[in-house]
Image (spheres, rainbow, N blue to C red):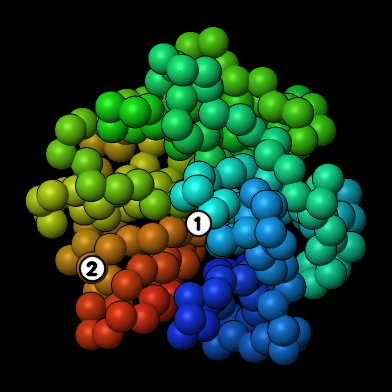
């Protein structure tokens, strides 16, 4: 069975995380009629908004790294666990587990998870960082427990050019000795907007796919989002990749989720 945790919102823009399952990845049902994780209360790091970044099943426990937005417009990296994927407990009742850098650092204003994966050496993550002059890039961090993270001294491991509009949430996973990172990029030129791919053997030195964007915006037909918000890539079998992507529906103000496969 496929399992999806997604962000939904009401007409008054109150967001929450929902849960759905599917036998084919196309037709989805909601086992829980209510959201499975909601925004915090006054003063919490996720008081204004909440959305999932990565969920993994780790030794019988579902672990979620999620993004919380506070009332000051700050985005915060947080963590929650669940025995069944439906009833979740926020770590520390909602605390930051990956902090932005000090003033003057490349990630002084933001440090939010892009993707998290685990192997025999522990947890690894790519994260999106930014500073006060508008620089955006990816950093690399590792952890032994998924809660206390150590940023790589070589960060940032990837910086973006000036024609960048925004970066959506991506996916990180490992096949053999190689890390695979897929991430949505929105640029001023529509031909440069789409899903990008990069690989690495150590998380520090990354090689971008020569064909980037590997899924250009024009390929998202018949439904083509105007802005790619997030993607989730799953290796399903030896050679098949499946990607669920979220973005704004160009025919309305609503968001929607689509599916793409490779090959």
Q: Tell me, for residue 251, which label it has, or none.
A: none
> Residue reaching furthest front?
42
Q: Is residue 108 above or below residue 104?
A: below
Q: Name the residue beneath numbered marker 2.
A: 226
In the image: residue 238, left or right of residue 44:
left
Tell me the element at label 1: strand
Please provide percent x and percent y for residue 25.
55, 77
On the rendered structure, is 191 left or right of 79? left
Picture quarter with the C terminus:
bottom left
- Residue at figure coordinates x 59%, y 85% from the top left: 28
Depth check: give the residue in front, 81 or 221: 81
In the picture, measured across the screen, residue 106 lies left or right of residue 35, that is left
Can see residue 29? yes
Q: Secondary structure at mark 2?
A: loop
- Closer-to-camera residue (67/238): 67
The answer to whether residue 12 is left or right of residue 5 is: left
Residue 234: x and y in percent read 55, 58
Which mark is first along the chain, 1 or 2? 2
Q: Residue 258 location, x and y as percent?
A: 41, 75
**Disc 1 marks which residue?**
233
| Horizontal and vertical percent position of residue 232 | 51, 58
Q: Where is residue 251, by image quadrant?
A: bottom left
Marks 2, 1: nearer the viewer: 2
Residue 118 appears anywhere in the view: no
Q: Give how far apart the Cα atoms at labels 2 and 1 are.
A: 20 Å
């Amino acid at each position: 069975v496929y399992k999806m945790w997604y962000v939904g919102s009401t007409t008054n823009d109150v967001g929450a995380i929902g849960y759905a399952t599917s036998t084919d990845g196309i037709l989805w049902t909601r086992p829980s009629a209510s959201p499975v994780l909601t925004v915090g209360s006054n003063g919490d790091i996720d008081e204004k908004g909440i959305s999932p970044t990565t969920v993994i099943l780790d030794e019988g426990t579902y672990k979620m790294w999620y993004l919380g937005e506070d009332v000051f417009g700050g985005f915060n990296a947080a963590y929650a666990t669940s025995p069944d994927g439906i009833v979740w407990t926020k770590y520390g009742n909602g605390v930051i587990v990956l902090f932005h850098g000090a003033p003057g650092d490349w990630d002084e204003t933001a440090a939010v998870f892009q993707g998290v994966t685990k192997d025999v050496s522990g947890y690894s993550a790519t994260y999106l960082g930014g500073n006060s002059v508008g620089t955006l890039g990816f950093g690399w961090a590792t952890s032994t427990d998924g809660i206390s993270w150590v940023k790589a001294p070589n960060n940032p491991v990837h910086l973006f050019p000036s024609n960048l509009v925004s970066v959506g949430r991506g996916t990180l996973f490992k096949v053999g000795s190689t890390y695979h990172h897929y991430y949505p990029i929105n640029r001023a030129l529509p031909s440069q907007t789409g899903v990008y791919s990069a690989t690495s053997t150590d998380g520090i030195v990354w090689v971008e796919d020569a064909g980037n964007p590997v899924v250009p915006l024009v390929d998202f037909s018949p439904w083509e989002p105007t802005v790619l918000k997030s993607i989730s890539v799953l290796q399903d079998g030896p050679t098949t990749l499946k990607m669920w992507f979220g973005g704004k529906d160009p025919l309305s103000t609503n968001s929607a989720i689509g599916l793409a496969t490779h090959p």
